[in-house]
Amino acid sequence: MTELCRASLWYSEHIEITDTKMHGIKALRECRDVVIDNCDIISPEFGWSVNGIQMKHSTAESEYFMMRATDLNFSDVQFKGKYSFQYIKNAVFDNCVLDTKDAFWHSENVTVKNSVVKGEYLAWYSDGLTLINCKIIGTQPLCYCKNLTLINCEMVDTDLCFERSEVQAILTSSVDSIKNPLSGWIQVTEVGEIIMDVAEATGKVMISDVDAQTEEFQKTVSENKKFVKEFIQNEIPQIQVASFYDTCFLRLNFVRMIGNGMEAVSYIKEKTGVYFSYGKQNGQGGNEFLRINTACSRSVLERSLQQLKAGITAYEKFCVERC
């Protein structure tokens, strides 16, 4: 694709692109089941509304990259641009370098691992974002987020972080300033300034040695995982539970439930109002999974499990009455 090529590969399915230069504007729109390997992309508005894309060993430069795409799996990707990954849903990024402003705005159910994310205003208004072993660079990151989790992340030149966010974070570096975290907790080695000037902001900032906080964090997660597994085994054996990568999440499997697993997941989320993120990163059939975050207090975890149990009971009653 030359720079004069425009709007190639729209509305296509089952695409594999390897060892290719893609230098034309607006490539790949509303496509499904895409694999990109060892490619060089220079394409503004690339990948809009793509459903199911795997990108690896590639470089990309773009504006509004992958907007509204779903089910993404990126590994060893270097990206430069702005307004990237906005409104995406269900994604995993591993070993990537993302140099971009306004990334992940309004995104849902995204996991970023072993990566560098550079640029201001990271992930505002996101829901269910998890960053693991990442380096985060730039001003005012991670504001107005819901269900935000950071595990062993380094933050560089970051000020006014976490404003009005629901956050659980363990950080391995100092932070310039933290402003009005709405709820949850942030463990950090050092912070230049803590700004708490709105009454509804109740998040806690804890300054402690990184080794100690890592050990305590891992202990809490381990105990919570054991609690979840025992609760499900004893109270809701209709579903199965398994680990989700090497993270604080557990994967809940609804495939064997009465009725339809995908329908059950949607019904439970809608009726209970409890937040569990979808497990679409597991590939095909991911809508039959939910992820539960164990990096939280035991009381919050128990309340969520009780809501889940009530939702499953209601769904099974619904299925019986429908028959």
Image (cartoon, grey):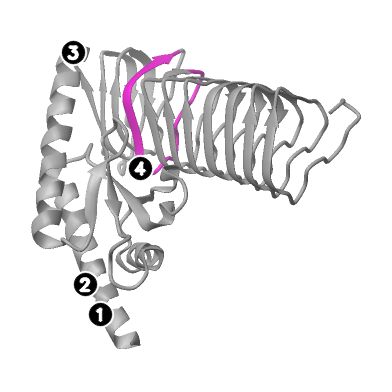
Q: What is the C-alpha distance between the residues marked 4 and 3? A: 24 Å
Q: Are marks 2 and 1 in contact (CB under 8 Å)?
A: yes
Amino acid type of the residue that numbered disc 4 sits on in the rendered structure: Asn
Residue, x 17% and y 34% (percent of image)?
221
Residue nearest the viewer, comparing 116 with 167 = 116
Q: Which residue is mark 2?
A: 313
Quadrant of residue 232 within the rendered picture: bottom left
Local crowd at mark 4 within 10 Å, few (<14), some, or many (≥20)?
Answer: many
Amino acid type of the residue that numbered disc 3 sits on in the rendered structure: Asp
- Find residue 211 and name its label: 3
Local crowd at mark 2 within 10 Å, few (<14), some, or many (≥20)?
Answer: few
Q: Which residue is mark 1?
A: 317
Closer to the camera: disc 2 or disc 4?
Answer: 2
Residue 264 relative to residue 296: left or right:
right
Q: Are marks 4 and 3 in contact (CB under 8 Å)?
A: no
In the rendered image, the quadrant that contains the N terminus is top right
Q: Secondary structure at mark 1?
A: helix
Locate residue 165, reporting x and y percent: 38, 38
In the rendered image, the quadrant that contains the C terminus is bottom left
Which badge, 2 or 4, comes first in the chain's sequence? 4
Q: What is the C-alpha distance between the residues marked 3 and 1? A: 48 Å
Residue, x 73% and y 41% (percent of image)?
28
Locate residue 312, reporting x and y percent: 24, 68
Residue nearest the viewer, comparing 311 with 30 = 30
Q: Are marks 3 and 2 in contact (CB under 8 Å)?
A: no
